[in-house]
Each structure stands twice: as C-alpha cells, then as structure tokens.
Image: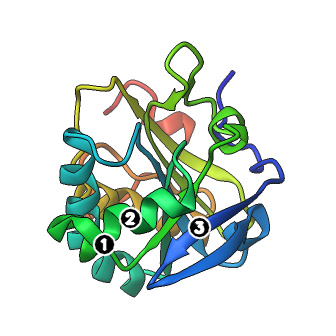
Amino acid sequence: MSLIGKEVEEFTAKAYHKGEFIDVSSEDLKGKWSVVCFYPADFSFVCPTELGDLQDQYETLQSLGVEVYSVSTDTHFTHKAWHDSSDVINKINYIMVGDPLHKISEIFDVLDEEEGLSNRGTFIIDPDGIVQTVEINADGIGRDASTLIDKVKAAQYVRKHPGEVCPAKWKEGEETLTPSLDLVGKI
C-alpha cells in the first residue's frame, strides 16, 4: 500500500547530530518540510557515496526550509563511530537516525526483513507530516540527491497553489498546468 498522502506514524529514536546524541520523533517531521533518506548500513560501499552526495545538497535543501534525516538500522553509536572515522561521513551536518529495532524502517515500508536492513528509500514529507514523494531503490542502485531539489520545489509549489500541477521535468518558474476537461487529450 502506498504511503503517498498518509501521515507518518508515530515513532521515537536516538540520533547523532553535530557531535551529540539527540532524540528524534515523528513530531520533528511536522512544521517544516523534511527529507527522510533510508540506507542499508554504516561502514558500507554505496551508502557513503549517497550520504556525501546528500550533504552536498544539504545547504540548498535548508534554504528551501527542508530538514534532512538519514536513517539506517544501525545505532546512533555506530553513526558516531562512522562519522569519526570516515572523511566523507565526517562532513555530514544533517541528522543521522538510528533504527536498531527496525520500527521506523517498518513504518516507511523499507525494511528487508531477511537482511534486517533498510532498503534505499527517500521520502519528502510536508509540514503536516504527510508523505508527498517516495523513491525506493534496490541495494546496489545509488541515488542522486540533486533530484530532490526540483521535487521539493514542485511539492512546495503545488501546496501553495491548489488546483495547479507540475508537469514532467518541471523547474521553478516554468509553466504549470490547471487540470480541466479542456486539457484532456490536448497535451
């Protein structure tokens, strides 16, 4: 069942952020835009490339009012150890959430139960805590965080302009569509 249009279920977790352990909950996903990025495991291969790429986009996402949360089934202690030992991960300024009990991974339906690890899932969540986009990749397929920028901008535009929609490859400032009978069969 799709999570699109559904409110994120309640959860609490421990996280590592800027040299400290913090508490994170589903309530933190409300009141602002959020990107929740699941990945299989710390100290792995594709994961640091993705998380580093996400860090490269973090400043732009923050300028759009977006907070970023990475999540794996590792603990917050493991996140700190990885942060302390990897040049790529050491640059991360966003929140790294631990999900050792798999609750968050189950809520977002990205848990690979046989492996006990999260699949690669990316979710854009609006300020009401409602899931607006979902992308889930197989373990060996890394993501491109730059694509999040246009998706966030489109989601924000549609939220501010009810009745309008953003067509494929839409960029901020380009023309949108207003669905109507007049458009049926004309696009």
Question: Mark 3 packing: few (<14 Cα in 10 Å), some, or many (20+)?
Answer: many
Residue 148: image location, x then y, percent: 33, 58
Report the residue at 58% width, 55% height from top: 98
| Residue lying at the far top of the rendered structure | 114
Q: How was this image coloured?
A: rainbow
- Of 54 and 48, which appears nearest the observer? 48
The alpha-carbon separation of the residues under discs 1 and 3 comes to 15 Å
Q: Are marks 3 and 2 in contact (CB under 8 Å)?
A: no
Report the residue at 24% width, 48% height from top: 169
Q: Which residue is mark 3?
A: 15
Residue 35: image location, x then y, percent: 49, 61
Horizontal side of residue 75 vs 19, given as left or right: right
Question: Mark 1 packing: few (<14 Cα in 10 Å), some, or many (20+)?
Answer: some
Element marked by disc 1: helix
Q: Tell me if residue 117 comes above or below residue 155 in the rendering.
A: above
Type of the residue with mark 1: Asp
Type of the residue with mark 2: Ala
Horizontal side of residue 78 vs 168, given as left or right: right
Q: Which mark is in front, 1 or 3?
A: 1
- Of 52 and 158, which appears nearest the observer? 52
Q: Tell me if residue 58 comes above or below residue 137 in the rendering.
A: below
Q: Which residue is mark 1?
A: 84
The alpha-carbon separation of the residues under discs 2 and 1 comes to 5 Å
Q: Which residue is mark 2?
A: 81
Horizontal side of residue 154 vs 108, given as left or right: left
Chain-order first, disc 3 or disc 2: 3
- Of 106 and 162, which appears nearest the observer? 106
Q: Are marks 2 and 1 in contact (CB under 8 Å)?
A: yes
Residue 73: image location, x then y, percent: 54, 42
Q: Quadrant of residue 159?
A: bottom right
